[in-house]
């Protein structure tokens, strides 16, 4: 047992407010101690995600306040709790959105732990990575290869994993035509996997610099969501949290195609003519991810040397990073750096 509790710096959300009001406050907090099954991590980098934005602005129910956001965390194991054998002190690890599950409910026992009735999430139920130190369950953390920097790896741990699950759920296949609506952190990683699989990718974005990045990463076509692409889509993913995009995407999709909604929060869906859904088109949500999703994606990311487009900010500038994310001024992913 540790005899003292040293302090650490953290960006803390004490009350949900709009990003324009600088909702996070730099505070000195107690350095957390790992419980049984946990590791304490000295954070090196933490990605800034749209889910963080939904959290700080109160668009998600907040089960815990104050809370330290951040769920794309890379760092070094500084100490381990009782019973931990998966990691040793000094190991580089990553912590994603899924913090823990019960392991007993009907979803956990049927390989659907992403739907666990008692799931907890990093930066929502448990303090996350907008801090110098954090604790996480060892069995929900992942080894990060040494040939990848912390800044490069951080965006993989939410945007990358969710994008990968979305690709699976929309049925993206080799030789198929895939549409991506919105081209931020998650989409710029998903396109690299899709191109590796041999998909022809059509990107819909209102941002000129996002369109240029999509073209650099192999998009066959870029345009605005209101435009009709040159060919019908076999599958599509909406990454932008805008319900109005659903009928626009359905209009661009072929018969039997599946549309996956990758966001944890979305504005209301408009009334949509049944004809757009007819011909066995499918609309489905993407809810969180499983540990297998994380393991499979990280293996692919390492194998194809997936490239992350990153803009870095020091921890104390987390509010600026969130505001620029809200304004679509980030090309790729924003990452907070702590080392």
Image (spheres, grey):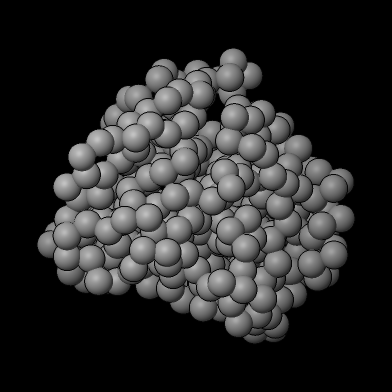
Identify the residue at horizontal 60%, vertical 82% (top origin). Answer: 303
Q: Is residue 224 visible?
A: no
Decide which of 232, 224 is in the foreground and name it.
224
Vertical placement of residue 29 versus 78, above or below:
above
Q: Is residue 336 visible?
A: yes
Decide which of 178, 17 is in the foreground and name it.
17
Identify the residue at horizontal 79%, vertical 50% (top origin). Answer: 210
Decide which of 61, 13 is in the foreground and name it.
13
Going by the image, does 296 lie left or right of 6? right
Going by the image, does 63 lie left or right of 161? left
- The picture places residue 251, in percent across and down from the top left corner, at 67, 55
Going by the image, does 199 lie left or right of 267? right
- The picture places residue 176, in percent across and down from the top left corner, at 67, 78
Examine the image and state in which quarter residue 279 appears.
bottom right
- The picture places residue 44, in percent across and down from the top left corner, at 54, 51
Identify the residue at horizontal 59%, vertical 23% (top origin). Answer: 19
Vertical placement of residue 195 versus 227, above or below:
below
Decide which of 148, 248 is in the foreground and name it.
148
Residue at the extreme left of the image, as rendered:
104
Examine the image and state in which quarter residue 194 appears.
bottom right
Identify the residue at horizontal 79%, vertical 43% (top origin). Answer: 206
Residue at the extreme front of the image, as rendered:
3
Going by the image, does 318 lie left or right of 25? right
State how many labels appear: 0
- The picture places residue 339, in percent across and down from the top left corner, at 58, 47
């Amino acid at each position: 047992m540790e005899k003292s509790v040293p302090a650490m710096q953290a960006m803390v959300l004490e009350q949900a407010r709009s990003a324009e009001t600088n909702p996070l406050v730099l505070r000195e907090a107690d350095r957390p101690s790992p419980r049984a099954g946990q590791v304490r991590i000295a954070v090196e980098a933490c990605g800034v995600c749209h889910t963080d934005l939904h959290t700080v602005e109160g668009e998600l129910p907040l089960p815990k306040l104050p809370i330290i956001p951040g769920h794309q965390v890379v760092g070094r194991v500084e100490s381990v709790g009782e019973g931990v054998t998966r990691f040793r002190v000094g190991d580089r690890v990553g912590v994603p959105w899924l913090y823990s599950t019960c392991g007993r409910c009907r979803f956990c026992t049927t390989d659907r732990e992403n739907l666990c009735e008692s799931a907890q999430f990093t930066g929502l139920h448990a303090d996350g990575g907008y801090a110098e130190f954090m604790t996480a369950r060892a069995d929900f953390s992942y080894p990060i290869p040494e040939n990848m920097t912390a800044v490069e790896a951080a965006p993989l741990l939410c945007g990358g994993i969710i994008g990968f699950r979305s690709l699976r759920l929309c049925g993206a296949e080799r030789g198929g035509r895939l549409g991506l609506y919105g081209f931020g952190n998650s989409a710029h990683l998903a396109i690299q996997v899709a191109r590796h699989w041999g998909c022809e990718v059509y990107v819909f974005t209102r941002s000129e610099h996002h369109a240029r990045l999509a073209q650099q990463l192999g998009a066959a076509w870029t345009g605005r969501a209101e435009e009709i692409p040159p060919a019908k889509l076999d599958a599509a993913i909406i990454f932008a949290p805008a319900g109005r995009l659903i009928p626009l995407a359905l209009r661009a999709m072929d018969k039997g195609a599946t549309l996956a909604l990758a966001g944890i929060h979305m504005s209301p869906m408009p009334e949509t003519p049944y004809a757009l859904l007819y011909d066995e088109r499918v609309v489905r949500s993407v809810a969180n991810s499983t540990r297998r999703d994380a393991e499979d994606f990280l293996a692919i990311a390492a194998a194809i040397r997936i490239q992350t487009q990153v803009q870095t900010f020091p921890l104390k500038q987390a509010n600026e990073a969130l505001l620029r994310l809200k304004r679509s001024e980030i090309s790729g992913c924003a990452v907070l750096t702590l080392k």
